Image (cartoon, grey):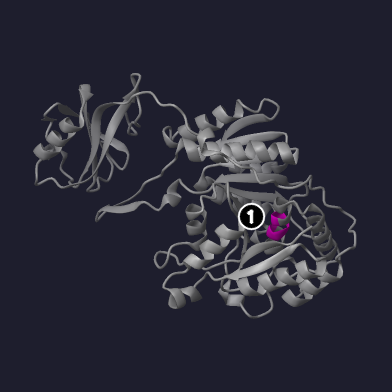
Amino acid sequence: MLKQTVTLIKGDGIGPEIAEAVKRIFEAANAPVAWEEADAGLYCIEKYGNGLPKETLESITRNGIALKSPTTTPIGGGHKSINVTIRKTLELFANVRPCKTFPGIKTRYDNVDLIIVRENVEDTYGGIEHQQTPEVAQCLRLITSIGSRAAARYAFEMAGIEGRKKITCVHKANIQKMTDGLFLRSFNDVAANYPTIDNNDILIDNLCMQLVIKPEQFDVLVLPNLFGDIVSDLCAGLIGGLGVAPGGNIGSDAAVFEAVHGSAPDIAGKNLANPTALLLSSIQMLRYMGATAYADLIENALTMTLEAGVKTRDIGGSSSTEEYTNAICENIGKLPSVLSDAVQTNSRVRIAREQLRVEQSPWNIRGVDIFVKTTDISLLPRTLGKLTLSMVSNRGTKIYPGEIPDIVIVDCQRCRYTSNETLTNDDILEFLNAFPTDLPWMHIEKLHEENGVALYSKAQGE
């Protein structure tokens, strides 16, 4: 098999150490990969002015495949997440996280074998946040039919190749009726095209309970971005932790495989880091490339090493990074007692965008939600132009009309103005121009109906 050039991002913290470990193991296995190293991480801030240079994105785009070590993401400030930037810029729409118990790693569970497919570019990870008032911060959660369909279609295509029998859609559509409702409807629309693969759905809270009771009941899970992030870490805990959890970010034209754990700067340079997660991600990458024999060769060597009790400290052993890497290299070509049961390549499923769009019926504007900074709702005009105040909510709880509940009222009111007739944009502008200037508003959403069905949520208490 001809060598394929792969972009290698060594990252920061322990990233360079575990990347070197993987390079050594690939060399020992004579894997068909030529590395093209590229920069990303904290050290790039001073060098390039940002954590992800454009040259690195160009390298990934050119090669189509990358392997990425951890990079540090500051909490509560600093530069944007490099992981999220890569996923969004290259539209890597599916985050694929296999979770499988490994011989030699002691956990509470013996037979976990599931795959998480997480929508990877939207949801709250759009990063659209506003400080609406001194007391209220807002995050916009974006769920689209295109993003939801892309994740679902990838899951079904992958399941067919992997020999998986059942796909479960995870959501909270009983509460988040608009966003998770759209995610679930999109999943069901896609599922109808794959009659030979069983499918069902489950609420996110019930899933978390079921996972710790009987994880073997699940095969493939499809989730929105935030739920997928949380559940994938939960599942990593079932198999021994993030140190043994691989991950791949898959798009139509590129894929980036990465260790999903942090950069652990506290142990950087101490020869203590565990390269297993990055190595498993590289095995996932080889299967994606079609280099299945090499993937099996390396996975068998890893399994044999773990069976022999050679492990780093975080997974119950005492070996250093170098000792652990040496043992895997020495076991290349040997067969463990438990052989890999991987079916084949993880496949370059290509999702054409035209497959994902849905014809929409005409929408009619029937009102607005306008967010107003005030704690005195008596100041709100009851009628302006063609619109009448029909509801006010505070932190999602209805406080008008009717008796105000005994809750803490903050200084941001969602004020719903509606009309019995279809409105135009000019009607909305007239409304805004007439709105009292001493009542500052921060945000407005037009409310629509489609075929007489409201396309907007109600407030709690209605």
Residue 344 can be seen, yes or no: yes
Quadrant into which the C terminus falls = top left
Q: Could you tell me how many numbered marks the image carries? A: 1
Where is residue 105, by image quadrant? bottom right
At 35% from the left and 28% from the top, the residue drawn is: 455
Please tell me which residue lies in front, 167 or 29.
Answer: 29
- In the image, the segment drawn in magenta is 281-285
Q: Does 284 appear above or below 211?
A: below
For residue 255, side relative to residue 333 (left or right): left
Q: Residue 48 in the image: state x and y as whole percent.
A: 44, 74
Residue 312 image-quadrant placement: bottom right
Q: Is residue 237 within the magenta segment?
A: no
Residue 139 at what x, y percent from top left?
36, 49
**Percent of width and height locating residue 296:** 81, 55
- Decide which of 21, 239 is in the foreground and name it: 21
Q: Identify the amino acid type marked 1.
A: Gly
For the question of whether residue 244 can be seen, the reply is no
Quarter of the N terminus within the rendering: bottom right
Percent across and percent down for residue 449 are: 32, 25
User: In this orientation, which residue lies closer to the viewer: 177 or 153?
Assistant: 153
Q: Which quarter of the picture shows residue 30?
A: bottom right
Mark 1 residue element = loop
Residue pointed to by mark 1? 247
Residue drawn where x is 43% and y is 48% of the image: 124
- Mark 1, residues whose alpha carbon is within 10 Å: few (<14), some, or many (≥20)? many
186 w.r.t. 140: above or below: above
Name of the residue lying farthest toward the bottom: 270
Q: Is residue 292 left or right of residue 451?
A: right
Q: Residue at x 69, y 38 (%)?
A: 159
State whether the magenta stretch is mostly helix, strand or loop.
helix
